[in-house]
Amino acid sequence: MARKKDREIPEINASSMADIAFLLLIFFLVTTTMDIDKGIIVTLPPYLPDQEEIEVKLNQRNVLEILVNARDQLLVEGELADVSELKELCMKHVDNNGIDPEFSDSPQDAVVSLQNDKGTSYNRYIEVYNEIRAAYNQLRENRAKQQFGVSYEDLDTARLKEIKRYYPLKLSEADPTDFGNAGGGE
Amino acid sequence: MFRRKGGKKTPKISTASLPDIVFMLLFFFMVATVMRESEQLVNIKYPKATELQKLEKKSLVSYIYVGPPTTKYKEKYGTAPRIQLNDAIADDVKEIRTFIQNERAAKPEKLQNKMTTSLKVDQDTKMGIITDIKKELRKVGALKINYSAAQRVGKL
């Protein structure tokens, strides 16, 4: 017989492999979006029907009241303020430890209350929210450095929790007012 | 002589490793790819902030866009800020409920409580509409949200 003893399997031509791969590559290149979504991550309180809205009595001194009106003006504890002062004020309020009678008893008791109008711009809202966050982050960072000598971001979970327990972010958002519409302001 | 008539030719460069290189690139892009999100029907200029956190796990994020419709859709939807869910402009805030429920149903049960809703809102939008959205989200139990923002450099 002319047949070979062990017939070799014919090689598959792989020259078109590159073309196929290129095609796929170009597809993925085009559809790829590299940008990462960044933002302020917030956990909302669970919804309670209107009647069941819990009223918590808080000592007035423990609440830092921030109001934003339809013209994006800020009222902090009854006084006009600028957004740039907010971080400082908020830190002072939280880290007061009962010294100033106007501010909180202790960081654990401190509450920041934020109320805006329906006509407040989103931009201003984010600015205010950002400043409150910044104040807390700064306080936590300071404490982490002081207690553990490490930056807040590099802490392990147990220590992170401890710091968070010392400076809990208690932000209460009241339903917005509707003066911008009703008062005929603008 | 055994030399060929045409004289010495330059040797061909072997392209045998080309597929390997291309495949390597291919795999990189396959891993890095997230399919483009739905077409944006609204114009969004993000507010600026400093305390930003990155959103992990893109597959678990649902997006709600709010802003004035783009020039193409101005005639149809007007110039006031509107809510966009998926590929369509929502007529009512209540549609968010079905939207979230649908998004949830598409994910495995284990991961459903890890879902985040990212609010991509134009900076000039009024808070009234945002409050309504937040209320709807709370009602449906989508409590983890993200206010999408751009990095701010410098002071206020």
Image (cartoon, coloured by chain):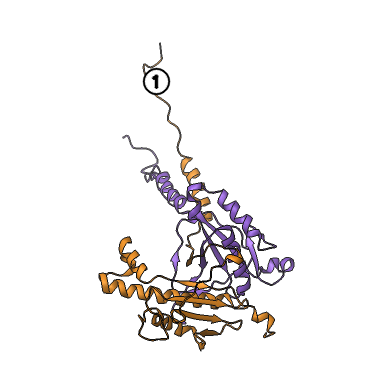
- Residue located beneath label 1 in the image: A7
Please, what is the three-letter code of the amino acid marked with disc 1? Answer: Arg
| Of the pair B55 and A132, the residue shown nearer to us | A132
Mark 1: few, some, or many residues within 10 Å (few <14, many ≥20)? few
In the displayed structure, A105 sits above or below B129; it is below
| Of the pair B26 and A7, the residue shown nearer to us | B26
**Rendering quarter of residue B41:** bottom right
| Of the pair A33 and A161, the residue shown nearer to us | A161
Chain A colour?
Answer: orange
Count the marks.
1
Q: Residue at x 56, y 85 (%)?
A: A73
| SS type, badge 1 | loop
Q: Residue B112: horizontal and vertical position, in percent?
A: 51, 51
Q: Residue at x 47, y 60 (%)?
A: A34
Q: Residue A122: horizontal and vertical position, in percent?
A: 57, 74
In the displayed structure, A121 sits above or below A52; it is below
Q: Residue B34: horizontal and vertical position, in percent?
A: 50, 54
* Residue found at the very far top of the displayed protein: A1
* Residue found at the very far bottom of the displayed protein: A79
A72 horizontally vs A13: left or right: right
For the N terminus of chain B, which image quadrant?
A: top left
**Rendering quarter of residue A95:** bottom left
Chain B colour?
Answer: purple
In the rendered image, is residue B43 in sight? no
Q: Residue B102: horizontal and vertical position, in percent?
A: 60, 51
Q: Residue at x 43, y 51 (%)?
A: B28
* Residue found at the very far right of the displayed protein: B75
In the rendered image, is residue A118 in sight? yes
Q: Chain of mark 1?
A: A
**Rendering quarter of residue B90:** bottom right
Q: Residue at x 68, y 69 (%)?
A: B71
| Of the pair B116 and B139, the residue shown nearer to us | B139
